[in-house]
Image: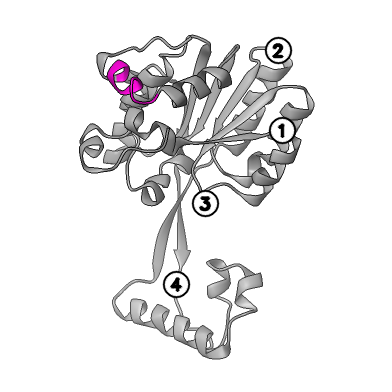
C-alpha cells in the first residue's frame, strides 16, 4: 500500500497515479531493495537530473511492503562528496554498507614507449578496441600522453570500490532465508547477471530500476527469463533535487 510520507509526495502522487499503481504492483509483497550507488550516481549525466538521497528514501518508505533499503557505496575519508553521501545515507536510515575507496596510481610515462606502441594505451583501452585502431590513431594518442608528460603529469589516480560480490551475496542470502518475495536492484552492471538469474530460477520476482542506455546487454537478456526493468525517469519528480523539479519537464507516468 502507498502511504505518502510527506505532503510533497502526496501532492506529486496526484499527478502520477499510473506510476504509483505500477509501483504498488511491483511492491506487492515483502520487498528488499539493493542500491549500487557507484553505478547509479553517474546516471545523472544521462538523466540531466540528480537523485536526492533524502527524497528517495522518503518515497520508498511510502510503500509499506518495502522492508529494507540497502545502500552500498565506497567511502573516501576527507573527501567532501563521500562524506556528504555517507551522512545522507545514515540520516536517511538506509541500511548502509561501505568500505574504503582504493586509490590506484596509473603511470602515463611515455618516455620509453615507441610512438606506434599500444603498451601504455592497453592500460586504459580494451585490447579488442585497440586492434581496430590505425597506427596514426595510436601515434596520436601516444602524443597526447607526451604532452601531459611535458606538463609534469607522469601518472593519474583512479578510484576503485565496487560491491558486486557483497550485493550478490546479500540478495542470495535473503532469497535463501526467504526474507523477500520481490528483489529490486538499482544498477545496470553486467556483474549482477548471475545472481539475478539465480533469483529468477528460485521463483523470485526481480526488478531492475535503471534508465535507458544504462543496462548491460547481459541483464537485458534476462528479460526473456522474467527480469522486469523499471525506468526511474518515471519517478523523477519524487526523487530529484527539489530545484530540478522546477526547471525540467515532468517524466512519463
Mark 4 sits on what residue?
A: 108
Mark 2 sits on what residue?
A: 177
Mark 3 sits on what residue?
A: 213
- Camera-nearest residue between 21 and 153: 21
Q: Is residue 150 visible?
A: yes
Mark 2 or 1, closer to the camera: 1
Tell me which segment is drawn in magenta: 9-16
The label on residue 226 is: 1
SS under mark 3: loop
Q: Residues within 10 Å of mark 2 (few under 14, many from 20)?
A: few
Among numbered discs 2 and 3, the one appearing first in the sequence: 2
Mark 2 or 3, closer to the camera: 3
Residue at the image position 41 percent from the left and 22 percent from the top: 17
- Camera-nearest residue between 148 and 253: 253
**34 lies left or right of 242:** right
- Camera-nearest residue between 150 and 45: 45
Q: Is residue 74 visible?
A: no
Amino acid at each position: 500500500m502507498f502511504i505518502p510520507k510527506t505532503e510533497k509526495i502526496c501532492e506529486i502522487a496526484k499527478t502520477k497515479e499510473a506510476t504509483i499503481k505500477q509501483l504498488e504492483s511491483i511492491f506487492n509483497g515483502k520487498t528488499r531493495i539493493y542500491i549500487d550507488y557507484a553505478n547509479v550516481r553517474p546516471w545523472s549525466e544521462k538523466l540531466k537530473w540528480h537523485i536526492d538521497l533524502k527524497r528517495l528514501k522518503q518515497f520508498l518508505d511510502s510503500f509499506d511492503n518495502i522492508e529494507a533499503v540497502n545502500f552500498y557505496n565506497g567511502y573516501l575519508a576527507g573527501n567532501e562528496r563521500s562524506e556528504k553521501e555517507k551522512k545522507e545515507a545514515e540520516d536517511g536510515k538506509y541500511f548502509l554498507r561501505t568500505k574504503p575507496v582504493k586509490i590506484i596510481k596509473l603511470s602515463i610515462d611515455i618516455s620509453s614507449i615507441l610512438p606506434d606502441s599500444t603498451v601504455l594505451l592497453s592500460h586504459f583501452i580494451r585490447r579488442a578496441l585497440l586492434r581496430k585502431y590505425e597506427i596514426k590513431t595510436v601515434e596520436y594518442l601516444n602524443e597526447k600522453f607526451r604532452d601531459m608528460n611535458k606538463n609534469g603529469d607522469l601518472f593519474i589516480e583512479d578510484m576503485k570500490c565496487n560491491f558486486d560480490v557483497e550485493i550478490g551475496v546479500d540478495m542470495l542470502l535473503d532469497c535463501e532465508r526467504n526474507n523477500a518475495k520481490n528483489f529490486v536492484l538499482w544498477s545496470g552492471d553486467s556483474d549482477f547477471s548471475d545472481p539475478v538469474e539465480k533469483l529468477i530460477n528460485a521463483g523470485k520476482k526481480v526488478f531492475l530500476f535503471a534508465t535507458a542506455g544504462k543496462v548491460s546487454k547481459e541483464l537485458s537478456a534476462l528479460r526473456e527469463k522474467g527480469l522486469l526493468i523499471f525506468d526511474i525517469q518515471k519517478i523523477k519528480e519524487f526523487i530529484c533535487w527539489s530545484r530540478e523539479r522546477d526547471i525540467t519537464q515532468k517524466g512519463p507516468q
